[in-house]
Image: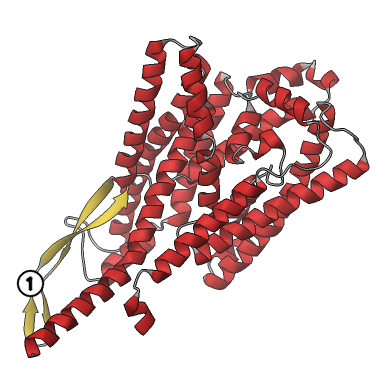
Amino acid sequence: MKASNANPYQELSRRLLFVVFGIFVFRVGAHIPIPGIDLAQLKIVMDKHSSGWLGLFNMFSGGAMSRLTLFTLGVMPYITASIIIQLLSMTFPPLEQLRKEGAKGRSKLSQYTRFAALGFALMQSVGVSKLLIAQNLVLEPGLLFYFVTAVTLSTGTLFLMWLGEMMSEKGVGNGISLIIFAGIVSRFPEGVSHLFMQAKQGQIHILAFIGILIAASAFTALVVFVERAQRQIPINYPSRQQGGKMTAARGSVFPLKINMAGVIPAIFASSLVIIPGMFNTLIPKYILDGPVGDIVYLIQPGQPIYFALFVAAICFFCYFYTSLAYNPSDMADNIKRSGAIIPGIRPGKTTRDYIETVMMRLTFVACIYLSVLCAAPELMYRWWQMPFSFGGTSLLIVVVVVIDFVSQIQSHLIPAQYASLVKKNRKGNMDLLR
């Protein structure tokens, strides 16, 4: 207790240093290549497919895909596993029962998610190995290369999962989100440099260059505004008799965020829409020459059907995650237990229905907001060759993670500020006694 009073910010400093250390480890691993790769040929292939699903995958891995490093798969297998386990927890009775068992059930679901993430990592690593061999990027193809690549990439994903959990437990904020954030931000300097180089060489018009800067600033302001915005439902506390006193009636608000799902729909949708695009490189060429090739082409990034699927996935996960994370019945019960009422709304089922209606309307607005934010910059990329780092999904993730990180820091500072205030008051009282 004395040590805490002597340095009230020591705990926060230790947590921030652990976050910095975790990001440092992630960035070091993102520069260690897997063995047996022709790096010169790899650069040619990545430059050729930088605007497709490889570019999006490379963005989430923080450039690890372009170098084929230990963390090439990043946390994408974990995200995919999380999607499936959460979907099953809503429809599959045994998992649904675990979800209702509290902390013990959530721990079991987390264990299932890790096993599923390992399975997806193994499958994706085999797919990556096949892709590398098909693109003539492997120096010595064979079963040994498949084995080494599968073990290396899967181990990298499992390590990132563990590192993210440690950063959540011993650091500040959500560790997985911070890893994705670090990967995206690491691409910003290259994106900015590429953008200025294009403008300098005349590859993009000066008006387009200015428009990109204005659009990036406008989208950033939009994200900050919407993520901070709330729909405040007024509630009243009627006057009550407490012992010999009569408490006066007072009013308050019940806040609901406009985008209650946060960045989850954008991450989940992005991780799903790149899966069909992978078939273009994994399916044999003779199959792609037929109708299957036409279908695969239509769902490639930049095609209208791709954007339609992307928006549909965002809307689905927006409603799904909101219904999973926020229960109108629990909210209505909490309002009732606190002795409050919503003006003009009867307690119980009527309150629950009212809150559910408000949530659905807010979620509809959030769907429009996320769809415009994530799809519009990609359209700008197709038109103006805007760097992939400035895409709507990456911008949303960066801003939301920063907002959450700052909020977490402020929550950790409250006890320290309280302790400092108590210390000052105690010192003031001692001076008065003197």
The answer to whether residue 54 is above or below residue 101 is: above
Could you tell me which residue is drawn at 60 percent across and 58 percent down? Answer: 163
Left or right placement of residue 417 versus residue 208 in this view? left
Residue 355: image location, x then y, percent: 31, 53
- Secondary structure beneath disc 1? loop
Query: Which quadrant would the N terminus be assigned to in this image?
Result: bottom left
Q: Amino acid at mark 1?
A: Ala
Residue toward you, 245 or 41: 41
Residue toward you, 277 or 241: 277
Query: Which quadrant would the C terminus be assigned to in this image?
Result: bottom left
Q: Residue furthest bottom?
A: 433
- Disc 1 target residue: 248
Left or right placement of residue 318 versus residue 279 in this view? left
Residue 80: image location, x then y, percent: 63, 46
Residue 185: image location, x then y, percent: 50, 40
| Whether residue 87 can be seen here | no
Could you tell me which residue is drawn at 32 percent across and 79 percent down? Answer: 5
Residue 95: image location, x then y, percent: 62, 62
